[in-house]
């Protein structure tokens, strides 16, 4: 750089060879303050939501064993969800403030209600599946849980997209599909593992189809992100992305090849694809943090937008 | 799709006050940090010692939960020809002399020292407020954006929503904190502590309408005086946050000061976000139906 260069960090804006100007290389945005609980919740919420949908439809078709196991899977996942969310709050004792309002501009507010409705309806449906009691309430709860489950599986993508974090906001068109597919992968995998192989054909089909969908959706997302797709090839986001793809391919292969005959293979394959779905959430989570931490990912697209 | 929260002044009816704000004229900031100190004292913001940064005179680094005013220091070496009409060769020679330690910046080249006091922007379209699930963040009768510390549960959503990286979580406390534009002082008809302490009137407080007129005149004068990069930042209503209650006169591009050049309130895209999410939910439903009914039981 010629003498127009900056002393330290800050450069004149029309210098030809600067990458992106920043203030002493410092981030423009604050990094997300969320801890490990949040990507884990995005996984358990998706698992609970898609399992509820699977359970309801399996029940409609008369696959009663699969339906029962899927309801119990959904119950286990949804029971784990509020503790994760509450543990991540700065003031856990005030978690109930989440239900002070219903606010459509806040996907977190919308999601709190979806989670509440899902939790109650999955609870009733699973109780009926396990004990045979509360039949009339369960008849209402099952379709409600299935419908709320679709929202529970995808709203977390809206939550991440509705931020200033570049890798999340710029992925707003595709991220819900990544998360929806991931939810289906984890439900298919968990229910294929939890159900005797003779009764689990629907769960296996779900796991295989959704694993392909998640791999495709993630690839499309990274390509469409252009500059911000870079963060998926760096650091933790890249490592989790590799783990995710490896687990999805290996697990789907195992489920497809041996899942119909061998329960151990179904358990291993189901666990692998579910781990893949979890790793995808971690990868997206880390990508957001990485994009917020680097001023280039914030300034460069905005500057280009201004300069036309 | 236009999604928004009911806001000032409609929500206040007759109790609505004229919108108040800051005009921070960085061209007359002398970097004394009186604003940082006054803010900390009045608002009882905890100390946070971060040590020596090496970033010019800036050791407080950035806005955050424990810093609601922050003075940025930028040392620039302007090409001499920007001031004196020196040739490229002369400029390069002067630059080399500085690099080699043979001359100070002042002797060797055109040194420019920019200082600017940053603060929460109190956006017209405030993403922090819009995404807050508890309603802890609200708009006051003065049109400013304030956190109710007795409501905030520390979910952290606002931290990621703010396009300026202003609001942040206080570690030992769990809640989020930021500039209140001295809501308590405003209620008592006093100007905010930072503006009160500013010795050069670089920080000017008042009715937003009047501040904008003053700023328009000031930037025009600076341009006429040869400051061709002088510009107003967030002074209009046509930017991505609908303009701001706290706006700035800058002498260089915003990113030089660590400010985003084209910040956008994320909620402007929320319509498309919900649409994509609904489409994905429908696709998930279709996928579940296909998996369950698309083969043997």
Image (tube, coloured by chain):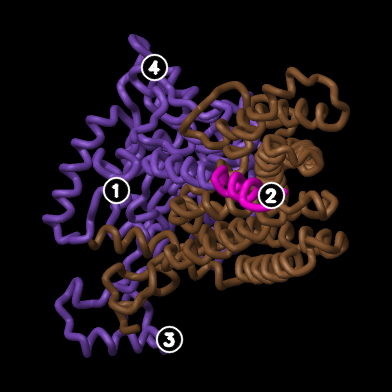
Chain colours: A brown, B purple
Mark 4 element type: helix
Let me know if residue B289 is in the magenta part. yes
| Spatial CA span between label 3 and label 2 | 57 Å
Instruction: Say which residue label 1 marks.
Output: B233
Q: Are marks 3 and 4 in contact (CB under 8 Å)?
A: no
| Spatial CA span between label 2 and label 4 | 39 Å
Question: Picture coordinates of residue B222 (x, y %)?
Answer: 18, 53
Q: Which mark is residue A43?
A: 2
Q: Which mark is residue B101?
A: 3
Up-down relation of residue A95 to residue A80 (above or below): above
| Spatial CA span between label 1 and label 3 | 37 Å
For the residues carrying marks 4 and 1, which lies nearer the camera in this image?
Answer: 4
Q: Quadrant of the N terminus of chain B?
A: top left
Question: Would you call the spot at circle 3 few (<14 residues within 10 Å), some (14-19), or many (20 or more)?
Answer: few
Question: Would you call the spot at circle 1 few (<14 residues within 10 Å), some (14-19), or many (20 or more)?
Answer: many
Q: Are marks 4 and 1 in contact (CB under 8 Å)?
A: no
Q: Chain of mark 2?
A: A
Question: Picture coordinates of residue B96 (x, y %)?
Answer: 35, 88
Instruction: Say which residue label 4 marks.
Output: B11
């Amino acid at each position: 750089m010629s003498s127009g260069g900056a002393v330290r960090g800050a450069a004149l804006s029309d210098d030809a060879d600067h990458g992106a100007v920043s203030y002493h290389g410092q981030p423009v945005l604050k990094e997300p303050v969320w801890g490990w609980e949040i990507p884990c919740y995005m996984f358990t919420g998706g698992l609970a939501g898609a399992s509820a949908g699977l359970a309801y439809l399996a029940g409609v078709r008369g696959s009663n064993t699969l339906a029962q196991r899927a309801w119990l899977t959904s119950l286990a996942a949804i029971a784990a969800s509020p503790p994760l969310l509450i543990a991540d709050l700065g003031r856990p004792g005030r978690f109930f403030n989440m239900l002070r309002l219903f606010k459509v501009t806040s996907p977190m507010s919308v999601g709190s209600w979806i989670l509440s409705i899902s939790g109650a309806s999955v609870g009733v449906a699973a109780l009926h599946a396990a004990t045979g009691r509360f039949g009339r309430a369960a008849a209402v709860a099952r379709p409600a849980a299935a419908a709320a489950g679709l929202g529970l599986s995808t709203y977390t993508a809206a939550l991440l997209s509705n931020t200033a974090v570049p890798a999340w906001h710029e992925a707003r068109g595709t991220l819900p599909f990544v998360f929806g597919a991931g939810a289906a992968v984890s439900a298919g995998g968990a229910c294929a593992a939890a159900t005797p192989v003779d009764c689990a054909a629907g769960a296996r089909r779900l796991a295989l189809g959704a694993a392909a969908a998640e791999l495709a959706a993630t690839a499309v997302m990274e390509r469409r992100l252009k500059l911000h797709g870079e963060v998926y090839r760096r650091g933790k986001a890249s490592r989790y992305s590799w783990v995710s793809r490896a687990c999805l391919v290996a697990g789907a292969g195992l489920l497809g090849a041996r899942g119909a005959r061998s329960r151990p293979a179904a358990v291993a394959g189901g666990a692998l694809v579910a781990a893949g779905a979890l790793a995808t959430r971690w990868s997206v989570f880390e990508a957001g943090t990485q994009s917020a931490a680097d001023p280039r990912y914030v300034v460069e697209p905005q500057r280009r937008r201004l300069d036309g | 799709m236009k999604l928004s929260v009911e806001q000032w002044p409609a929500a206040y009816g007759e109790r609505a006050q004229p919108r108040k704000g800051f005009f921070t004229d960085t061209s007359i900031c002398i970097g004394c940090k009186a604003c940082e100190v006054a803010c900390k004292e009045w608002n009882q913001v905890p100390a946070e010692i971060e040590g020596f940064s090496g970033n010019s005179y800036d050791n407080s680094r950035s806005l955050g939960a424990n810093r609601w005013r922050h003075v940025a220091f930028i040392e620039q070496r302007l090409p001499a020809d920007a001031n004196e009409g020196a040739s490229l060769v002369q400029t390069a020679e002067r630059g080399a002399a500085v690099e080699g330690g043979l001359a100070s910046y002042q002797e060797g080249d055109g040194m420019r020292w920019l200082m600017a006091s940053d603060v929460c922007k109190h956006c017209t379209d405030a993403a922090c407020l819009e995404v807050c699930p508890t309603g802890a963040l609200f708009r006051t009768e003065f049109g400013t954006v304030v956190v109710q510390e007795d409501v905030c549960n520390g979910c952290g959503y606002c931290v990621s929503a703010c396009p300026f990286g202003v609001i942040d979580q206080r570690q030992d406390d769990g809640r989020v904190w930021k500039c209140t534009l001295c809501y308590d002082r405003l209620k008592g008809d006093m100007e905010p502590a930072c503006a009160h302490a500013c010795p050069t009137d670089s920080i000017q407080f008042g009715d937003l309408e009047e501040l904008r007129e003053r700023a328009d005149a000031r930037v025009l004068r600076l341009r006429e005086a040869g400051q061709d990069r002088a510009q107003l930042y967030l002074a209009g209503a046509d930017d991505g946050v609908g303009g701001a209650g706290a706006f700035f006169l800058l002498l260089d591009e915003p990113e030089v000061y660590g400010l985003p050049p084209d910040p956008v309130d994320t909620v402007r895209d929320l319509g498309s976000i919900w649409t994509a999410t609904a489409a994905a939910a429908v696709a998930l439903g279709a996928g579940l139906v296909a998996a369950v009914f698309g083969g043997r039981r």
